[in-house]
């Protein structure tokens, strides 16, 4: 390793020297793992910024291990490297850089340190990515935000225009794009932004492919649920989904297809039976929380319908109509909806009666007008952003030609799932 150290020290000053250094490191790359015990000592003698290229190869060799005697040390080393590395040097071997980012997240999640990866990965995106370019690190960053439940940290990345996709420059693969969309949908779900979540899940489902990946399947299941929470309507499979994928999705998503059909019937009892039947599936898939939210959404919609038909009702009648276990459950829903302004009513607990009232807001005040206009502008802005995103994905020649034609033909139209 002394020879390796000396070569790194001697060939790191000029661009031409670094090219020679890279060629040398590529030749001995696989051999570096034979000297794991000496790597830390060598790296200590290499200031990260000045010797970023050589340091990166040594660190990547160490990071390739499956287990570490001191996981805190490797996490600290990668964190320091991402914050201090020279972009011009690491861009000479961009694959190694993205490998380190991926291992950083994987090790951190295993060691319950995901929160410590968010900021360094954000810096990594800023350092290495060209403006508007989607890279593998975008997906790793979102994964870190999701694992640490730091959803808000992901918004600046998700809300930026990042749809130049260059497989030659970044080495990005279909899996990276799928994960970016999927993690984005999961983050928006965590933020209860169901419009955006549905859109991102839909993008994952409609990626051109002939083979169904587990990422697409997970995205589709959540697309069905967030779409209901977004629109209040039972969704159909996205129309841009390839025909071969459509059949496979429906075939392996029976518990979700049946749940959507139950929701479409507006029959709470049928929805409840479906949930009971597939409870273990939903819990295993970690979608049970969304399933409960959809059922809750249906109950509230049914209550709102009652307000349009009746002026006064007994809590017992409401409980029976909504297939609830008790009048207390009906009262709980009604009180919450009254507090949220979803219905206007008063409850006589002594008599067990509820009286529905007209909306007290006249909707002709200046305040309401301003609020309504603000909401309209928000919706218009969101629609424009989503349309722009859709247009970029649909028409961007880099995405269609390089990703779908070149990348997919080269990889047999498959998305690799293995790390």
Image: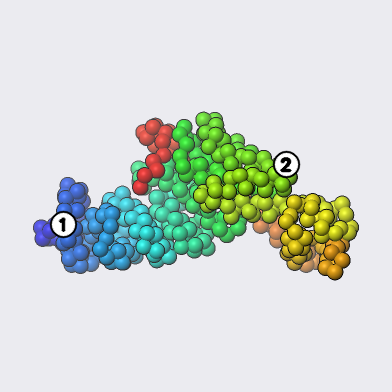
Q: Is residue 391 above or below residue 117?
A: above
- Residue beneath the point at 20% across and 64% down: 40
Q: Name the residue under label 2.
A: 265
Query: Would residue 255 appear left or right of 96 to someone viewing this image?
Result: right
Dot 1 crowding, Cα within 10 Å, few <14, some 14–19, many 20+: few
Which secondary structure lies at badge 2?
A: loop
- Residue 308 appears left or right of 336: right
Residues 34 and 275: in front is: 275
The colour scheme of the drawn protein is rainbow
Residue closest to the eye, 43 or 113: 113
Label 1 SS: helix
Q: At which x and y percent is residue 186?
A: 53, 53
Residue that protrudes farthest toward the left in the picture: 3
- Please indicate, yes or no, whether residue 242 appears anywhere in the rendered image: no
Residue bearing the label numbered 1: 35
The image quadrant of residue 300 is bottom right
Quadrant in which the N terminus is drawn: bottom left
Task: Compare marks 1 and 2 and give the one earlier in the sequence.
Answer: 1
Which numbered circle lies on residue 413?
A: none
How busy is the neighbourhood of tag 2: few (under 14 within 10 Å), some, or many (20 plus)? few
Expressed as whole percent of the image width and height from the top left, the position of residue 30 reads 19, 48
How far from the left and from the top, in percent, is residue 133? 43, 50
Q: Residue at x 41, y 39 (%)?
A: 415
| Residue located 48% across and 58% down the image | 146
The residue drawn where x is 45% and y is 59% is: 147
Residue 60: image x %, image y %? Answer: 26, 55
């Amino acid at each position: 390793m002394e020879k390796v150290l000396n070569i790194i020290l001697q060939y790191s000053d000029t661009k031409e020297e670094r090219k020679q250094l890279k060629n040398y490191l590529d030749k001995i790359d696989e051999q570096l793992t034979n000297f794991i015990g000496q790597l830390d000592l060598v790296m200590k003698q290499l200031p990260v910024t000045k010797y970023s290229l050589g340091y990166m190869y040594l660190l990547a060799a160490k990071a390739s291990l499956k287990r570490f005697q001191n996981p805190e040390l490797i996490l600290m080393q990668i964190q320091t490297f991402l914050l201090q590395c020279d972009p011009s040097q690491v861009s000479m071997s961009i694959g190694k850089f993205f490998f380190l980012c991926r291992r950083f997240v994987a090790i951190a999640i295993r060691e319950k340190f995901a929160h410590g990866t968010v900021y360094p990965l954000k810096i990594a995106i800023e350092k290495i990515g060209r403006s508007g370019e989607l890279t593998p690190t975008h997906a790793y960053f979102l994964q870190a935000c999701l694992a640490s439940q730091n959803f808000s940290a992901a918004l600046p990345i998700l809300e930026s225009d990042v749809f130049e996709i260059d497989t030659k420059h970044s080495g990005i693969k279909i899996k990276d794009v799928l994960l970016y969309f999927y993690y984005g949908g999961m983050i928006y779900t965590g933020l209860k932004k169901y419009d955006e979540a549905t859109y991102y899940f839909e993008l994952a489902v409609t990626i051109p492919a002939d083979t169904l990946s587990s990422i697409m399947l997970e995205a589709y299941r959540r697309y069905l649920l967030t779409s209901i929470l977004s629109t209040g309507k039972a969704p159909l499979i996205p129309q841009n989904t390839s025909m071969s994928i459509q059949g496979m999705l429906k075939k392996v998503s029976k518990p979700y297809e049946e749940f959507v059909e139950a929701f479409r019937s507006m029959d709470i009892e049928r929805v409840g039976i479906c949930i009971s039947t597939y409870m273990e599936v939903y819990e295993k898939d970690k979608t049970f929380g969304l399933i409960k939210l959809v059922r809750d959404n249906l109950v509230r919609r049914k209550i709102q319908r009652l307000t349009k038909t009746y002026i006064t009702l007994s809590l017992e009648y409401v409980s029976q109509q909504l297939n609830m276990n008790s009048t207390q459950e009906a009262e709980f829903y009604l009180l919450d909806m009254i507090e949220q302004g979803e219905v206007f009513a008063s409850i006589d607990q002594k008599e067990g009666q509820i009286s529905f009232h007209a909306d007290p807001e006249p909707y002709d005040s200046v305040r309401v007008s301003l609020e309504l206009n603000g909401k309209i502008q928000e919706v218009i802005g969101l629609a424009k952003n989503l349309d722009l995103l859709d247009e970029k994905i649909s028409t961007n020649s880099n995405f269609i030609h390089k990703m779908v034609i070149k990348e997919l033909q080269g990889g047999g139209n498959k998305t690799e799932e293995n790390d």
